């Protein structure tokens, strides 16, 4: 279904009226709430939260039960105790150095700024444990919302934070094992179009080099590659597919293996920008022309000879859409979690239009 912006929304999980009846996003429990529930003074709650002495075991038990029941989290940032504090949101990326995330991060920041909020960035380095540590650290500092590009596939650790009122939107990849908003690119459709483009230019032996298969985007792009080959009646050989870390040495070995032997591939579809850059270097060392289509655009792609044909996704639109949805949550709309899928675009520049060399 298309909304007024042209974005296609795809139902993913059963909708529900809200996340927690009577609890608006951003309305998080305070130490005063804990004190009222436990029937103790504010100072007593402070002592328990900060691990200070002077509280009886029975009183500590009551306070802890109130903390657990309310989903209270300690405020680690002194500034947020001041009246009139500036709102803040957290953005957890895979890798701050990846060019793909620059436009995405800037778009989130611009939306946050328009709402008078500060943005705090962090990188998970594709490590699920680091992602969880970073997300919970941001929650402890009382951010009002989170935009998360997940590294892991189990986000149940966030359930207490969601119940406590932390607005959360996942972007680029869906959350695992929880019901949450997500904004994605059409990874499957984009990859299918890119490979179909190579097939339309006469290629039958087409290699695929992608990221780790546990990553949602890598798996979806591989699925699109397989679908395009199946549509054309082409049986895919195992040696034509390689998924793993995007380390240049691994990608180089995969590309060289596909280009060797009596029946080498005549075209390669690369699963992301980092893979594409390494494959371009490998192809530059080969005399035989090999067609190339990459998922994600890369800097200077139009200046190479031939220019690099890509399946481009709009990173800025991903960030902007995710941030706008986050602030709709914070405004109290209480929308049911949704899955929003943005279209990709095939950009032809020459490398994807090369005919088979044999």
Image (spheres, rainbow, N blue to C red):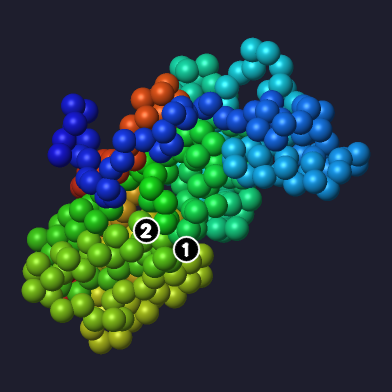
Give me the C-alpha separation between circle 1 and circle 2.
15 Å
In the rendered image, residue 236, in percent from the top left (x then y), is placed at 20, 77
Residue 272 versus residue 340 in the image, above or below: below
Mark 1 residue crowding within 10 angstroms, few (<14) / some (14–19) / many (20+): many
Residue under pointer 2: 216
- Left or right: 322, with 234 as reference point: right
Q: Secondary structure at mark 2?
A: helix
Task: Name, please, the residue furthest toward the right.
Answer: 54
Residue 4: name its quadrant: top left
Q: Is residue 31 among the parts visible in the rendering?
A: no
Q: Secondary structure at mark 1?
A: loop
Residue 240 versus residue 81 in the image, above or below: below
- Quadrant of image for the C terminus: bottom left
Residue 208 versus residue 354 in the image, above or below: below
Question: Which mark, by number, is residue 281?
Answer: none
- Left or right: 3, with 58 as reference point: left
Figure label count = 2
- Left or right: 26, with 261 as reference point: right
Q: Which residue is at a point 57% across and 58% down the rendered structure image? A: 127
- Quadrant of image for the N terminus: top left
Q: Is residue 193 among the parts visible in the rendering?
A: yes
Of residue 67 and residue 120, the one placed in the foreground of this image is 67
Task: Name, please, the residue furthest toward the top.
Answer: 84
Q: Which residue is at a point 58% across and 52% down the rendered structure image? A: 132
Task: Name, please, the residue furthest toward the bottom.
Answer: 262
Of residue 247 and residue 340, the one placed in the foreground of this image is 340
Q: Which residue is at a point 42% across and 56% down the rendered structure image? A: 176
Residue under pointer 1: 246
Between disc 1 and disc 2, whose residue precedes?
A: 2
Q: Which residue is at a point 8% across and 69% down the rendered structure image? A: 232
In the rendered image, residue 29, in percent from the top left (x then y), is placed at 60, 30
């Amino acid at each position: 279904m298309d909304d007024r912006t042209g974005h296609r929304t795809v139902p993913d999980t059963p909708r529900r009226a809200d996340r927690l009846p009577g609890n608006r996003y951003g309305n998080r429990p305070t130490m005063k709430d804990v004190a009222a529930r436990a029937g103790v003074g504010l100072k007593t709650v402070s002592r328990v939260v900060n691990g200070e002495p002077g509280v009886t075991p029975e009183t500590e038990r009551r306070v802890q039960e109130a903390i657990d029941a309310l989903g209270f989290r300690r405020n680690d940032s002194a500034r947020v105790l001041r009246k009139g504090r500036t709102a803040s949101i957290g953005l957890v990326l895979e890798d701050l150095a990846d060019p793909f995330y620059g436009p995405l991060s800037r778009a989130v920041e611009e939306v946050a700024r328009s709402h008078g909020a500060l943005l705090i960035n962090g990188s998970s380095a594709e490590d699920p444990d680091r992602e969880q540590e970073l997300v919970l650290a941001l929650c402890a500092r009382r951010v009002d919302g989170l935009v998360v590009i997940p590294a892991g596939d189990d986000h149940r650790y966030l359930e207490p934070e969601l119940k406590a009122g932390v607005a959360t939107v996942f972007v680029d990849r869906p959350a695992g094992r929880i019901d949450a908003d997500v904004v994605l690119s059409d990874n499957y459709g984009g990859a299918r179009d890119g490979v179909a483009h190579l097939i339309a230019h006469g290629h039958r032996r087409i290699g695929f080099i992608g990221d780790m298969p546990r990553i949602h985007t890598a798996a979806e792009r591989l699925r699109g590659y397989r679908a395009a080959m199946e549509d054309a009646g082409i049986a895919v050989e195992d040696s034509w597919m390689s998924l793993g870390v995007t380390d240049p040495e691994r990608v180089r070995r995969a590309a060289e293996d596909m280009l060797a032997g009596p029946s080498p591939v005549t075209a390669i579809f690369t699963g992301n920008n980092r893979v594409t850059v390494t494959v371009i270097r490998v192809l530059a060392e080969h005399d035989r022309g090999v067609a190339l289509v990459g998922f994600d655009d890369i800097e200077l792609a139009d200046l190479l000879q031939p220019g690099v044909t890509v399946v481009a996704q709009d990173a800025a639109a991903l960030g902007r859409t995710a941030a706008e949805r986050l602030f709709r949550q914070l405004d109290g709309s209480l929308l049911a979690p949704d899955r929003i899928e943005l279209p990709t675009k095939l950009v032809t520049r020459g490398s994807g239009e090369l005919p088979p060399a044999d």
